[in-house]
Amino acid sequence: MSDRRSFLKQSMIGAASLALAGPTLARAAEASGSSGLPAARPRVISTWNFGDAANQGAWAVLSKGGRALDAVEQGVKITESDLNNRSVGLGGYPDRDGHVTLDASIMDGNGDCGAVAALQDIAHPISVARAVMEKTPHVLLVGDGALEFALSQGFKRSPFSITPGAVQAWKEWLKTSRYHPVANSEESTYGLGKHRGDIHNHDTIGMLAIDAHGQLAGACTTSGMAWKLAGRVGDSPIIGAGLFVDNEVGAATSTGVGEEVIRSAGSFLVVELMRQGRSPQDACREAVERIVRKRPELRHNDTQVAFIAINRAGETGAWAIQPGFEYAICDGGDRHGLIKSASVLSA
Ligand code: SD4
């Protein structure tokens, strides 16, 4: 289908869905005429099973005609607030020295972005990342500098730095001190328990949204790999690795072993593949397959890497190395439930 025809078809689909979505969204879409982007049906897509609850937070913004940027921030804050989540926010597992250090990034479709890495004691690193984007000339602040900046912006230091559950798990881990990330399972991912099978799907949250104005945005936030070396930074706060957004094309974000994603500039790659005409699903597949082609040993050592993507028409897709990756989509206020991602390897 030619670009023009697919644009017209998309516009018609967009108009029809907006009529169903109600007057607020229709008004917001009308106002988008000046943005130069086609009216779109708002939609949000997030990684893992906790993405479902996070999507509801994003939808509260999108359904009122709000901005994708606000939606992704509000959405992932829900996951950051969940102290039972062992891989996002202050409930996360610590590094090998017992410190919980948080990484986060946020980006909009115009190329504005901000990020923090190795941030301690702050409940919502995603909001600090947004402040870096909006209040500084920089993109990434790390460690003590990120904390100082957060405090200067009025963020409050958390009354705790680590949860009792994470301390207990850390002490257990110290008995072996084995660092062996394994796909998908909370316990096994971090070398604490059995292998495979018992899949808890606790991992980084990456979220992508398109609003009624056709604007895209994304957010990614994590406590990183448990038992990492002090100072280790993963893909999540690295623009182009853990997150990339471009209104001209679409957006992508990742979860899994961040080192593999950084090596491949993963999220940028997915967006560039979409720019060349691939569907979101196909782009995620090629990015994951490229990682495995370069490092065939990943087939055999339980490493997980997964991408989700959305294009400017609102189409979505995902692909993973290992089976077990799930993601959640919300549009029209309906929960689509969890979707099982396709993967390079089979169960
Ligand atoms: C990282 N990608 O720090 C993140 C963590 C994650 O599965 O997603 N773990 O490498």
Image: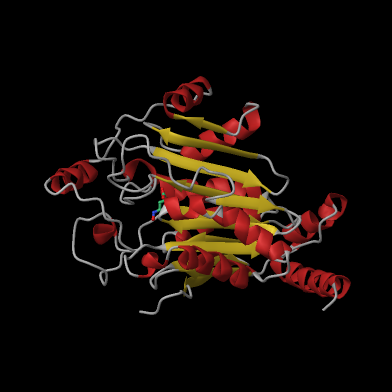
Q: Quadrant of the N terminus?
A: bottom right
Q: Relative to 46, is 233 above or below?
A: above
In the image: residue 37, left or right of residue 277:
right
Where does the image place residue 63, in percent across and percent down from the top left? Answer: 65, 58
Quarter assignment of residue 270: bottom right
Residue beneath the point at 38% across and 44% down: 223
The answer, for residue 85, to whether it is visible in the render is yes
The answer, for residue 334, to whether it is visible in the render is no
Where does the image place residue 183, in percent across and percent down from the top left? Answer: 34, 64
Where does the image place residue 86, in percent across and percent down from the top left? Answer: 31, 50
Q: Relative to 328, is 34 above or below?
A: above
Quarter assignment of residue 23: bottom right
Give the residue furthest to the left. 175
Where does the image place residue 152, in percent across and percent down from the top left? Answer: 51, 20
**What's the coloring here?**
secondary structure
Quarter assignment of residue 18: bottom right
